[in-house]
Amino acid sequence: MGWKTFLIMYFKAGNEKASEIVKKVESLGFECTIGPVDFVYDWRNKVPTKEDILELADKLVKVLDGTGVMFNIDTHETPD
């Protein structure tokens, strides 16, 4: 079992290129995926606190500022 944060992004046409946005999100430790979610952040062996999750969300807000991207995160324990 492990904790992961799942990220879904909603792009606004006419702003920054999606490929550039992906690079920014990956720089935070997210892995780009194919399927129902766009990215996954693996907390490894750590059980994240509310503060950890909010800190990660704050980092997303910072790197996505000005891109027009909206996002949704969902953090929960998953079977590995």
Image: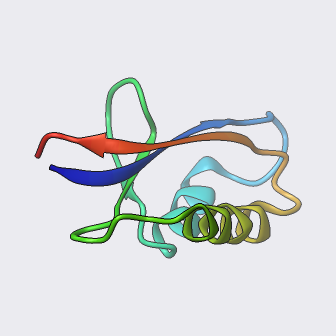
How many marks are shown on the rendered structure? 0
Residue located at (69% from left, 41% from top): 71
Q: Nearer the viewer, residue 19 or 79?
A: 79
Residue located at (67% from left, 63% from top): 54
Residue located at (60% from left, 61% from top): 50
Q: Nearer the viewer, residue 79 or 12?
A: 79
Can you say whether 46 is above or below 3 in the image?
A: below
**Image spot of residue 6 (x, y percent):** 45, 43
Q: Nearer the viewer, residue 18 or 76?
A: 76
Can you say whether 3 is above or below 12 in the image?
A: below
Can you say whether 71 is above or below 46 in the image?
A: above
Q: Nearer the viewer, residue 14 or 34?
A: 34
**Image spot of residue 70 (x, y percent):** 76, 40
Q: Locate residue 61: give its quadrant.
A: bottom right
Judged left or right of residue 15, residue 79 is left
Judged left or right of residue 44, residue 43 is right
Can you say whether 12 is above or below 57 in the image?
A: above
